[in-house]
Amino acid sequence: MKKYYFLFIYSLPLFVYISLTSNGWSTLLPVLIYFGLVPLIELFFQPDPTNIDKDLESQLKQDPFYEWIIYLIIPLHLFLLIKFFFVIDNTELGSIEFYGRISSIGILLGVTGINLGHELGHRNNIGLKYLGELLLLTSLNTHFLPYHNAGHHLNVATLKDAATARKNELLFIFWIRSHFGSYIEAWKIENRRMRTTNKFIFSFENRMVIYTVLNVLVLSSVYFIFGFKVLLSYLLVASIGILLLETVNYIEHYGLLRKKNEHGRYEKVKHYHSWNSDHIIGRSMMFNLSRHADHHYNGSKKYQLLKSIKSSPQMPTGYPGMMLIALLQPLWFYIMNKKLKELGE
């Protein structure tokens, strides 16, 4: 995939801005495009499994183009969220503009908030990790990083993992189990880290304590500056962002389980423990996250370096389309259980 395809992510803040500054049906542009037009297009375009040549990897790894795509979208994300607070305060409840703007910012928080926060949260640079935490804070989903990095990547495709969907598990049940289960596990992970370093659990060295305080400060600030209506709207858009994340979690490992060996230990994570998609638009929107098998092989690998693994399980379409199919549960089970059967699951 050509590197300029990743610039497609900038269409999201553009359409969100249009949603915040227009009226009528145009406020629904992000929903109509990313969950209407994009899934339709990806049904008719073949996926692109092309990988970069090995001798180009070091060049792409150091190419500032890929980093600046991330850096420049962060201030846009923050600007649009703050603008939303002002705009939604003057938007009539129950109007098409209200629903359009709520859904638009919800998509923004799910994509450039949580997904980009995920990308930066895997980096080894402490400054970039802080930026990832900032993005996750705007989405009120700060517990994601402790659990994702130290829990999900360790226990993926096992019954221990809150973020791995079981075969025939209903989506709304998974939403609840994954979100609250990962929150509880994030506390356990941080508390365990405190005990192993002989630190007081409820100190400010515990990231979950810091995150809790920051979440309270953010919500309190929104309430005292903008009032109850804006606070409620913020909680609503954050919930949409979180549900988008959990729907992605649902489709990424649905029904795939690692086997135990004769010693009762789980096999190592393999390429066949993640569902993958090489559909270009979904890939560019999600920073190549849909090349998920390679991401689990090396979590710190930068998004532009992720490879397509031909022998990994493949989704029939891109992430946006698969998320829509997941909402149509009978259709989802029909398609994906058939694929699981072919895999011997």
Image: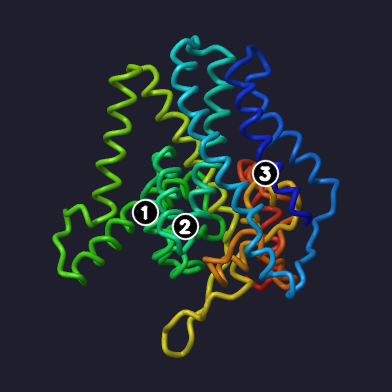
Q: Amino acid under label 3?
A: Pro
- Report the quarter where the N terminus lies: bottom right
- Report the quarter where the C terminus lies: bottom right
Q: Position of residue 339 (x, y in %)?
A: 70, 63
**Which comes before the other along the chain, label 2 or label 3?**
2
Viewer-nearest residue: 266 or 329: 266
Vertical order, 66 against 54 (above or below): above
Q: Amino acid under label 2?
A: Ala
Q: In which quarter of the image is residue 338?
A: bottom right
Q: Position of residue 317 (x, y in %)?
A: 74, 51
- Label 3 close to label 1 by CB (< 8 Å): no
Work out how far the residue at label 3 is from the one at label 1, CA to CA, in angstroms.
Answer: 25 Å
Res 71 label:
none
Work out how far the residue at label 2 is from the one at label 1, CA to CA, in angstroms.
Answer: 8 Å
Question: In the rendered view, does 218 fall on the left or right side of 323?
Answer: left
Identify the residue at horizontal 64%, vertical 35% (top origin). Answer: 12
Q: What element carries label 2?
A: loop
Res 163 label:
2
What residue did someone put label 1 on? 181
Identify the residue at horizontal 74%, vertical 41% (top origin). Answer: 39
- Residue 19 seen: yes
What residue did someone put label 3 on? 320
Question: In the rendered view, does 328 fall on the left or right side of 93?
Answer: right
Question: In the rendered view, does 125 fall on the left or right side of 1?
Answer: left
- Label 2 close to label 1 by CB (< 8 Å): yes
